[in-house]
Image: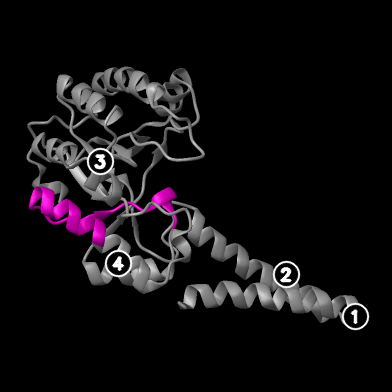
Amino acid sequence: MSKFHILFLSSITITAILIISNYLYPYNTFYPILIILSLFITAIYFYGVFEPGNSLFVKTIKGKTFFDAEQGVLLRFDDGPDPIYTPQILDILKENNVQAMFAVTGENSLKHPDIVTRIYKENHLLANHSYSHSYLISLFSRKKLYNDIQKCNKIIEEITGQKVKYYCSPMGHKSLALRKVLIRLGMELLAWDIRSYDTQKSEDDIIKIICSKVKERHIILFHDGIFKWTKNDREATINALKEVIIQLNKRNLLKPLSVEKSYLY
């Protein structure tokens, strides 16, 4: 069990004990103060785990750091590769001469190595989105998390011959275990600046969200894969992407496919 989990469990335990003690001995004035302190610690824990852009427990890279002194906007597609939607997205990117990132899972990469190969050969960035895409990944032990991420790394490397630099955690969730695992693997954690909500929203809403928020050196999160608790298709993503590219190109924000991809790795 990591220090991260110990912090959380200790906080919950202390809170429970104090609530029971306060009920049994209601006149002790220190109990409310201790309860508030314990709840505050718990709130910090949840913020560190579930808020994607924070660097409280793990240094997180967003668009400003990713691009450094360069200008541009990166389109990021998570959860694939998908045999239906990823090829459509690749066709749109190729037609518009746009470079993007695909954060792929190990499971889907094993099923569709030909699509991973196409992503790589068409000069896009491949990032590690874990092997399993578990919704409980923030509770993984250090060993289990290491094995999950490394398993995905090996699959990508076997297909492309290229080492993977960036890890994109499922749902953006983190832990202290993740920090130590990424240090060991020599990887960096990449987040996003704008979430398109394309797993939930309509085509028009996706376009509105992105075009109203996008600035230089932003990473925009889309999804090309299908997972439970989301819409069972990515038609809104496909249709919105076409208009988003038009609007971003008018502002000269997108990286062309002709750009050397080495700076992305």
Local packing at callout 2 (Cα closer than 10 Å; few below 14, some 14-19, many 20+) is few
Looking at the rendered structure, the kind of residue marked 1 is Leu
The secondary structure type at the circle numbered 1 is helix
Q: Nearer the viewer, residue 176 or 251?
A: 176
Q: Position of residue 69 (x, y in %)?
A: 20, 46
**Hey, what amino acid is under mark 4?**
Asn
Which badge, 2 or 3, comes first in the chain's sequence? 2
- Tell me which amino acid carries mark 3: Phe
- Spot occupied by residue 265 in the image (x, y as percentages of width and height): 15, 51
Q: Are marks 4 and 1 in contact (CB under 8 Å)?
A: no
Q: Earlier in the sequence, mark 4 or mark 1?
A: 1
Of 96 and 110, the residue lying toward us: 110
Q: Nearer the viewer, mark 2 or mark 1?
A: 1
Describe residue 168's horizontal placement relative to residue 19 as left or right: left
Residue 67 visible in the displayed image: no
Asked where in the image residue 242 lies, by quadrant, the reply is top left
For the record, the magenta segment spans 151-173
What element does badge 2 sit on? Answer: helix
For label 4, the residue is 147
Q: Is residue 161 magenta?
A: yes
Report the side of 254 relative to 145 (left or right): left
Closer to the observer: label 3 or label 4? 4
Q: Are marks 4 and 2 in contact (CB under 8 Å)?
A: no
Q: Looking at the image, which residue is at 10% across and 42% down?
A: 261
Estimate how packed mark 4 is, as few (under 14), some (14 to 19) or many (20 or more) residues with alpha carbons within 10 Å.
Answer: some
Residue 184 seen anywhere in this rendered image of the structure: yes
Question: Which mark is drawn over residue 102?
Answer: 3
